[in-house]
Amino acid sequence: MILAPHEDDETLGAGGLIQQAVEAGAAVRIVYLTYGDHNELAFLLYRKRPWLTPRIREQMGELRRIESLEAMAYLGVPGKETVFLGYPDGGTLEIWKRHWSRMAPFKSRATRTTTVPYDDAFSYGHPHKGEEVVRDLAQQILEFRPTRIFVTQPVDGQPDHRAYYLFLQVALLDLSSRIPPVEVLTYPIHIGTWPNLHGARPEEPIVFPKPLADDETPWWSLELTPEEARRKAAAIRVYRTQTVDSLSWMEGFARRNELFNTVPEIPLRPDGWSSTQGVVMSSETEAYEQESPQTHLAGVAYRNPGPGLQVRIGLRRPLDRELGVSLYVFGYRRGRPFGAMPKLRITWQLERLHASDRGVALRKSGIKGEATQKDILLTIPWSLLGEPDTVFVQAQGQAGGLSISQTSWRVLRRE
């Protein structure tokens, strides 16, 4: 099963893998999170008209769906195995962070709707809320029963790409007692300027993304034949609504190999620290396209000394009036709806700690914080997180209140 946030991601990251799976007789299903209806520049260039309305955006989303069906048919995947959920392009990470349970549904900036507007979508009419995404994805997994799932990375520069990985993890946790374990592999799409080579070059390899040089997760390279690489390039060109402004960059993924990695859970121990590296610049910054991160955030380590989760945020240089850090910490507990669990954002700036749960400030959180020139140590009571057995975390470097760098989202397992 291939999970693609937008129409074209599956071809860019796994077009060769799809061909090899089909050739080997394996069952393949593509599940799209969105209709890709938020790419304003590409749509304006494609339509050659200087305006977009919510209805026009929906029409463009429908056109992107048709292009995806055409591209997948070309690679050997039948239309009945391509599923479109239809959640808001550019909004699913916001849904992940805030829109659960009693919170109002997210309103799409493209279609101006709070429910899935496409009547041919699997999730048509479903509210833009986290539990709806998880439920729909879980239904696809239960029906298809995959042994392997490929999805975009939790450190990807595109927010929807990070969100799809996270929703998948919740769906698999919810299904853990109903299906055998599923192997999850991720593929990179937006990692700064990577892959740095433009145009289809089937004879050349695609190289490891330099911004992830400190990443310690296992990586694999899938070799493609020249014909598979050429077919991948041809499938990429099917996405006319996207190639109108980015053909050379998109064809840069048509190489003689594809990259995949696994992102294992991190065990929480009472005595030793479990650390994560791999800091990348936020895609909203000019430094995003630099190969080396220019940030004060160095990495994060975790442990469980007993009464709470301890997080140590490493610093490359001391904080000042402009620099700060923030941490997202979401708890998951078996037997309790994830939507009802706390979803904290903790910020540290000017030696002051602020905590909120889905945007609502927590006046007496019980969180303790200590700062030195080299790191910040946070202790978060397990009770504040809903006594979870699993925790989702991500750290960000802040400058002037804006996120400039980030670590990958990771899943911690409480032992």
Image (tube, grey):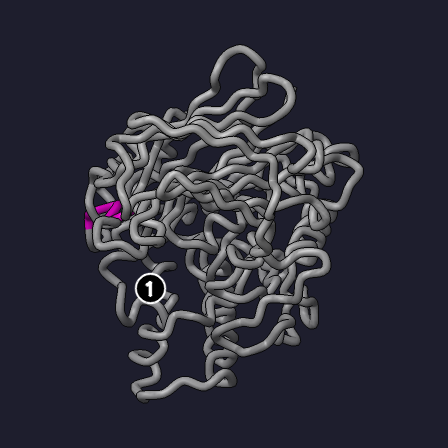
Left or right of 296? Residue 131 is right
Residue 146 image offset from top left, x and y in percent: 64, 40
112 relative to 35, above or below:
below
Q: Residue at x 61, y 42 (%)?
A: 364
Please state which amino acid type lies under the numbered disc 1: Arg
Dot 1: element: helix
Residue furthest to the top: 271
Q: Is residue 20 visible?
A: no
Q: Which residue is mark 1?
A: 237
The residue nearer to you, when weighing 234 against 371, is 371
Q: Is residue 193 magenta?
A: yes
Q: Residue at x 56, y 37 (%)?
A: 392
Left or right of 131? Residue 154 is left
Q: Which segment did they paint magenta?
A: 192-197
The quadrant the C terminus occupies is top right
Left or right of 20? Residue 372 is left
* Prevailing secondary structure class for the magenta stretch in the rendered image: loop
Q: Residue at x 27, y 37 (%)?
A: 296
Residue 327 image offset from top left, x and y in percent: 47, 40
Residue 70 image offset from top left, x and y in percent: 47, 66
Left or right of 343? Residue 217 is left
284 relative to 167, above or below:
below
The residue nearer to you, when weighing 397 against 55, is 397
147 relative to 140, above or below:
above
Q: Residue at x 50, y 43 (%)?
A: 346
Q: Is residue 370 visible?
A: yes
Q: Is residue 163 magenta?
A: no
